[in-house]
Amino acid sequence: MVSNPLNVTIPYAPPGLIPSAASSIATSSLPKASDFDEDQRQKIFWMRSDWVQHANHIKGTTNQHDKKRKGKTRASEGENVQMQYVVDKDGTPVTGYQATQMRQVARSIWTQLASAGIAPRKWMTDIPLTVADTYRKEMQTRFPELALCENGWKADQIAIDYYPSWRSAQAKRKGKTETKEEDNDSDNNSSNEYDDDEAARKIPLKRKSIPIPTPTSKRHKVSEVATEIIDPL
């Protein structure tokens, strides 16, 4: 039994949420910092700070030709555009095809979390520990390059970069579905309202008829009165 002296509620991930080799992976089997010397750790960006320092160093040195080409075009040609922090043991970035596969698997995991009703609103701030660990282990098992870092920060970085857009797309799809259903209801309601208006127009209004003399009738009567007064005969 796990000790919990602070009596803190520990988030729980349903068993079988992600049925794969991730459930059997042992933390001890993951690479450790002691497996590499300092130069190697910097080369593979073991710590997030190693990558940040490297990214700042190469910032602004991008080939002008590459800048004109869109990211999707470069990725379709096998170029790793946005995930150059994911490297092998020699420090060589994975290809664009590998990066695409990683993102696809990540989205599949997020979809499964959403189906289980435990997809977080924001990845790093709202995610339960057990769900975060399961995600990291799944990604590191399928892609060993993601295990070449401290505390699974590279798998986390994929989620930080791509989870918001994925969640936004899911919300839009859900919103369209709900809007369609609401529109159907609105159409029915509008039809009823229209029928009511039509019925109202068909009901005859009972109003007291008030004759309004026309100007012609007035002139005619005045003329007759004047004739009677003026005519001595």
Image (spheres, grey):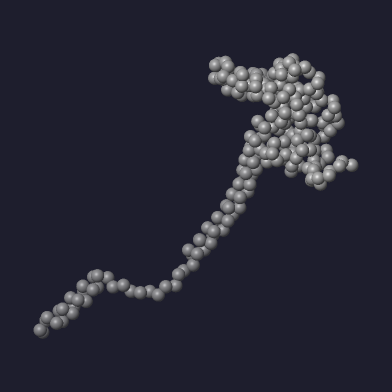
Q: Residue at x 79, y 38 (%)?
A: 130
**65, 204: nearer the viewer:** 65
Q: Residue furthest left?
A: 232
Q: Residue at x 57, y 52 (%)?
A: 187
Horizontally, residue 103 falls left or right of residue 216, namely right
Q: Position of residue 149 (x, y in %)?
A: 75, 24
Up the image or down, 176 lies above or below 149; here it is: below
Q: Residue furthest right?
A: 1
**128, 15: nearer the viewer:** 128
Residue 192 position by quadrant: bottom right
Residue 11 position by quadrant: top right
Residue 148 position by quadrant: top right
Up the image or down, 157 lies above or below 61; here it is: below
Q: Residue furthest bottom?
A: 233
Q: Residue at x 61, y 52 (%)?
A: 185
Q: Position of residue 19 (x, y in %)?
A: 82, 34
Q: Residue furthest front?
A: 5
Horizontally, residue 178 falls left or right of residue 143, namely left
Up the image or down, 80 lies above or below 172; here it is: above
| Figure label count | 0
Q: Position of residue 7 (x, y in %)?
A: 81, 46
The quadrant of the rendering that contains the N terminus is top right
Q: Is residue 211 visible?
A: yes
Q: Is residue 87 visible?
A: no
Q: Residue at x 65, y 43 (%)?
A: 174
**159, 213: nearer the viewer:** 159
Q: Position of residue 22 (x, y in %)?
A: 82, 31
Horizontally, residue 208 falls left or right of residue 145, namely left
